[in-house]
């Protein structure tokens, strides 16, 4: 279970969103977006802090008008995670949040306006050391591209992106990342694959407006999974009509499944059957809920019987195998103790947290010795 990912990532130019490196050899960052009213500073700050606790590397905030821009400035002072301002239509909003300390500007070439306005935004970004995200979306392509292609297509998305990239190139501005999102998986994947061969800048991946928690997770996992397997993608956002915290959870689970990112517990669990010697589903539900706060990478297997249990347990940091009259726990691949069902979850949680403590202590000792 500890083998490195076989995926060879596309080499991209590295930029920084606040203190988070995006592209190059940096880990693929996971981000989400607030859905509170930006004018409600307390509510927005609260949600950002919850997202950061869940593991978010970057958080995007919608800034629809100048009042929201002023609120954004207050929000920025109260949080630690880097913030991206999502801006449409009015380029002056971008100029204002640049003054207020934004970590990245997200603009849409389909609605930001004339080249002189883009030039003003780029100048503000350059003066303040702020990167730009070019955000192309199938639902908001420029009118002339809609007329040219008749409908959104991968080629239309890429042409829109390249048009704006050309603006930045003419202004000698290279600190940007690009997204070409669509809700149709095949369109988004084709557009990203094409764009990945044309530029060196990092790519922000997403299947836009993917759907609710279940359907959106499936659609995003398929689309983003295809691209990540190709080595494409430097930062991701899983767009769900659900609590934004779920976007962070799904994003990390996606990266963990491909061995592209290690953060928190990687559970291996059987779907359960009549051979199970304890309630696997209930055990997993309780463990996932109780252990959400853990960010230290750890592989934990929870298998209800002895068919696959020992084999899985030998490859994980902690493994639980169902047995009668007691269940067997493996630590670092070796049988360690037996647990009865009466306090199974409590006992297993205690053992996992102790293992996390030991692992973190080992890492801290290694850092101390290297200083």
Image: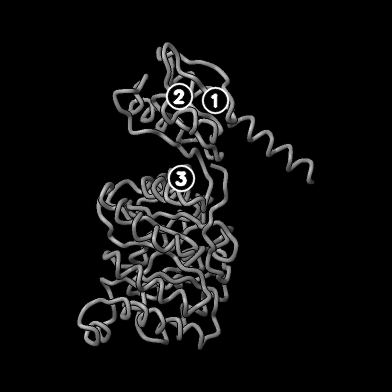
Q: Which mark is residue 321?
A: 2
Q: Position of residue 360 (x, y in %)?
A: 64, 35
Q: Which mark is residue 330?
A: 1
Asked if residue 93 shows in the view, the reply is no
Secondary-structure class at tag 3: helix
Q: In front of the other: label 3 or label 1?
A: 1
Q: Residue at x 59, y 58 (%)?
A: 19
Asked if residue 160 shows in the view, the reply is yes
Q: CA distance from mark 3 to mark 1?
A: 36 Å
Who comes first in sequence, dot 2 or dot 1? Answer: 2
Q: Position of residue 12 (x, y in %)?
A: 55, 70
Number of residues whose C-alpha sits closer than 10 Å to that of mark 2, classed few (under 14), some (14–19) or many (20 or more): many
Q: Which mark is residue 49?
A: 3
| Displayed quadrant of residue 309 | top left
Who comes first in sequence, dot 3 or dot 1? Answer: 3
Q: Which mark is residue 279?
A: none
Asked if the residues shown at circle 3 and circle 2 are in contact, with their CB atoms under 8 angstroms apart, the answer is: no
Height in image: 247 above or below 196? above
Q: Residue at x 45, y 85 (%)?
A: 167
Q: Position of residue 293 (x, y in %)?
A: 48, 35
Secondary-structure class at tag 2: strand
Asked if the residues shown at circle 2 and circle 1 are in contact, with their CB atoms under 8 angstroms apart, the answer is: yes
């Amino acid at each position: 279970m500890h083998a490195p990912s076989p995926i060879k990532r596309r080499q991209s130019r590295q930029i920084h969103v606040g203190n988070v490196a995006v592209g190059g050899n940096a880990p693929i960052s996971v981000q989400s977006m607030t859905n509170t009213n930006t004018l409600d500073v307390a509510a927005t700050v609260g949600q950002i802090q919850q997202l950061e606790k869940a593991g978010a590397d970057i958080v995007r905030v919608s800034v629809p008008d100048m009042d929201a821009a002023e609120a954004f400035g207050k929000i920025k002072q109260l949080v630690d995670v880097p913030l991206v301002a999502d801006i449409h239509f009015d380029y002056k909003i971008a100029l204002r949040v640049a003054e207020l300390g934004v970590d990245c500007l997200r603009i849409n070439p389909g609605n930001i306006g004339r080249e002189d306005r883009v030039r003003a935004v780029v100048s503000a970004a350059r003066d303040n050391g702020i990167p730009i995200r070019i955000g192309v979306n199938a639902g908001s392509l420029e009118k002339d591209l809609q007329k040219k292609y008749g409908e959104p297509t991968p080629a239309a998305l890429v042409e829109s992106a390249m048009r704006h990239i050309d603006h930045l190139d003419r202004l000698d501005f290279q600190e940007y990342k690009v997204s070409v999102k669509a809700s149709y998986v095949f369109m988004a994947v084709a557009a990203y694959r094409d764009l990945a061969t044309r530029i060196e800048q990092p790519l922000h991946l997403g299947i836009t407006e993917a759907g609710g928690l279940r359907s959106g997770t499936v659609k995003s996992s398929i689309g983003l999974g295809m691209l990540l397997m190709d080595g494409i993608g430097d930062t991701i956002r899983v767009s769900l009509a659900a609590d934004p915290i779920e976007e962070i959870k799904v994003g990390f689970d996606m990266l963990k499944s491909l061995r592209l990112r290690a953060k928190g517990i990687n559970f291996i669990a059987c779907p359960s059957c009549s051979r199970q010697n304890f309630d696997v589903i209930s055990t997993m539900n309780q463990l996932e809920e109780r252990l959400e706060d853990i960010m230290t990478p750890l592989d934990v297997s929870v298998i209800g019987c002895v068919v696959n249990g020992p084999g899985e347990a030998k490859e994980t940091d902690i493994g639980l195998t169902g047995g009668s009259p007691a269940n067997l726990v493996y630590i670092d691949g070796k049988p360690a103790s037996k647990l009865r069902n009466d306090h199974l979850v409590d006992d297993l949680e205690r053992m996992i947290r102790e293992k996390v403590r030991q692992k973190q202590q080992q890492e801290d000792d290694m850092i101390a010795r290297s200083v």
